[in-house]
Image: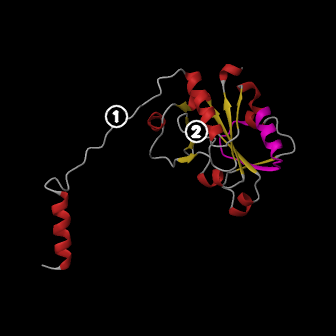
Amino acid sequence: MSGRDRVLARVRAALGPDRGGAAGVPRDYRRGLGAERADVVALFTERVADLRVPVRHVGADELGTAVAAALWGREAKRIAVPAGLPYGWLADLDGVRALADVPPLDDAALAALDAVVTGCAAAVAETGAVVLDGGRGQGRRALARAPAHHLCVVHADQIAGTVPEALARLDPRRPLTWLGGTPGLEVLVVDQRLC
């Protein structure tokens, strides 16, 4: 018996007769918080703030002004926007040059950006994470990671209570980018209750 065989025999003996059997994976996750929508949104805001990410609530009618104010506050002069970003989000911009990421901006153009504005696919109240899946108004992963400032718009109805609840809303075949506590991230929560 070789040294390798002796070591493997000891490992098999230590594992016992059930070695190699399929281990049961618990699937009794908490699927939701069981809380009112307003409480879920409030928890998301609290968690985002805990991650030292600036977060502000705005009504849908003031989103354009809030986007402009956030960019002006960072002195952004050159921003990128993904395909499908609603025009109204940028309607109040003045003195800020918005570049569409269609066709995709090259590395030099990405490096010259001051900010990017995107939407999201989902957000998680329990963790304060924001999830992008490359869909309409979100753009590609490189766009979300390129500039020093990423302004992400989250609609209150996109906020799930827990990670399993958020995962149920997402398509696992899409490129998922999870952002939480990311340097330069800023969140605007569009809350219909504020309209």
Q: Is residue 118 magenta?
A: no
Q: Amino acid at mark 2?
A: Gly
Residue at screen point 80% across, 46% down: 74
The structure residue drawn at horizontal position 60% and vertical position 51%, both measured from the top left corner, is: 140
In this rendering, position of residue 169 left or right of residue 91: left
Q: CA distance from mark 1 to mark 2?
A: 22 Å
Q: Which mark is residue 77?
A: none
Number of other residues with Cα within 10 Å of mark 2, as a class: few under 14, some 14 to 19, many 20 or more:
many
x and y, in percent, of residue 174 in the image: 49, 46
**Circle 1: element type:** loop
Report the magenta residues as a range.
65-87
Which three-letter amino acid code belongs to the residue tagged 1? Asp
Which percent across, then down, holds residue 22? 22, 49
Q: Which residue is mark 2?
A: 128
Would residue 23 be found to the left or right of residue 120 on screen? Answer: left
Q: Quadrant of residue 124?
A: top right
- Tell me where residue 60 appears, x and y as whole percent: 71, 26
**Magenta includes 72?**
yes
Q: Within 10 Å of the Cα at label 1, are there few (<14), some (14-19), or many (20+) other Cα atoms?
A: few
| Residue that carries the numbered disc 1 in the rendered image | 28
**Residue 190 point in image, percent of width and height:** 67, 29
Do the CB atoms of the residues marked 1 and 2 lie less than 8 Å apart? no
Q: Quadrant of the N terminus?
A: bottom left
